[in-house]
Amino acid sequence: MNIDSSPIAAIATAPGRGGIGVVRASGKNLQALITALFGATALQPRHATYIPFKQADGALIDQGIAIWFKGPHSYTGEDVLELQGHGGPIVLQLLLARVLEAGAELGLRLAEPGEFTRRAYLNDKLDLAQAEAVADLIDASTEAAAKSASQSLSGAFSKTVNALVDGVTGLRMLVEATLDFPEEEIDFLEKSDARGQLAGIVAALEQVFKQASQGALLREGLNVVLVGQPNVGKSSLLNALAGTDVAIVTPIAGTTRDKVTETIQIEGIPLNIIDTAGIRAIDDGVDVVERIGIERTWGEVGKADVILHLLDADHGPSRADEGIVAAFPPGVPVLRIWNKIDLSGHKPGVDPMEDATHVYLSAHEHIGIDLLRAELLRIAGWQQTGESLYLARERHLIALKNAGAHLDRAGEHAAQNDQSLDLFAEELRLAQVQLSSITGAFSSDDLLGVIFSRFCIGK
């Protein structure tokens, strides 16, 4: 793979002020950079050295710790120099500028987003799934997501996928050996138990897909949109789910003019709860601001993973509610939330019906809120298990699903005995390619570019 191998440098800590800030450089040989920065002061590999950071004219920038990781024993597999100083943005910018100046003759340049981790992948320090887990660990919004990302970063997900690849490869060898030596007249399918081996691989793949799907929920979460007429209790429900007053609640219709978003956790699953402007007829005393809010409501509904349609249990549904239901996009799960049961006399409960699941609760009195949380988990497909979950990405799920489809077709060919062994072998090969793409054994340059461009600079 062609890649610019010139040394790179960047600020590796997050923007803003902090107690510590880090400037990182990586290259095949950074000894000349170290000499340019610190003169005769020698840095011992993997030892922290407290040292002044100076401008080219000797003016002091900061004092901190310099650590040199001699390749290949480093994060990127190259020489890595880390300068750890105070975390002020101006100080770090000055320090980065000095590092780039000192390394100019080496061709030192500013790193692109994700380039340090990309080099770690290219130098076999991480596989592709582990490299993606670095970004997922940084972005984790819940404790469960962070734990799953750590699992993937440690190589647990890759190890599981590689075991599937090994199983498919072993079966391919048996099939192709039979194709190469037909004169032996070996009853391949029976003596090698090819069908049994294939069934075992399929079962293992289904288990991995289940764990990866659950992990994908931890990473992505769900967008849950609250929809209904004004004053039906959407903002009260948002506050009840969030456990705090994040939305203004008043008896005045049309209080919410724009969306209010709050991310909550249920069993470690992040849910982005989006409260929207109440929907009513545009000519029903609606001013221009509220009109824009209603338009934005429908925009959010179009992007929803789950729709909570709130209705007033005390007054019952209206013709306007029927119009709201008719405008919902097809295929999106809908929960009918009958709010204000403290006024209507209904009991809290869940009633699965043909049109949708109906949930009876009181947002104001916090009655039935746990029933709603359980329904949201059910719609998400979440199951509490003791198994390790992998913080899978959409491309991982697609690859696993495609591999499963190829294995299913391989099973169809296997059922025809020796008549379709060549097709059996080809489907196994395609399944192997799909699985190997997860860890990067088969990955295009374009895919790598997309993945690493989404990293932060300095990582």
Image (tube, helix red, strand yellow):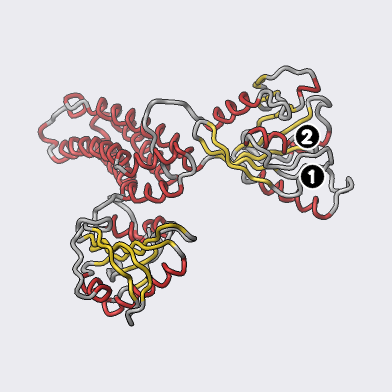
Q: Residue at point 41% right, 67% down? A: 92
Q: Residue furthest bottom?
A: 57
Mark 1 is on which residue type? Thr
Q: Residue at point 43% right, 69% down? A: 91
Residue 107 x %, y %: 29, 76
Q: Classify residue 279 by image quadrant.
A: top right
Residue density around tag 1, few if under 14, some if 14–19, many if 20 or more, within 10 Å: some
Left of 139 or right of it: where is 197? left
The numbered disc on residue 290 is: none
Please count the marks in the image.
2
Q: Classify residue 19 by image quadrant.
A: bottom left
Mark 2 is on which residue type? Val
Residue wearing tag 2? 232
Left of 335 or right of it: where is 11? left
217 vs 321, nearest the viewer: 217
Residue 105 x %, y %: 27, 80
- Picture layout, residue 368 above or below residue 270: above
143 vs 361, nearest the viewer: 143
Q: Can residue 1 be seen in the rendering of this structure?
A: no
- In which quadrant will I find the N terminus? bottom left
Question: Do callouts 1 and 2 mark residues in contact (Cβ within 8 Å)?
Answer: no
184 vs 58, nearest the viewer: 58
- In which quadrant will I find the C terminus? bottom left
Q: Residue at point 42% right, 25% down? A: 385
Left of 271 or right of it: where is 437? left
- Tell which circle, 1 or 2, labels the residue nearer the N-terminal end: 2
Q: Classify residue 241 by image quadrant.
A: top right
Label 1 to label 2: alpha-carbon separation: 11 Å
Please name which of the two marks, 1 or 2, marks the residue nearer to the observer: 1
Q: Residue at point 80% right, 37% down? A: 231
The numbered disc on residue 255 is: 1
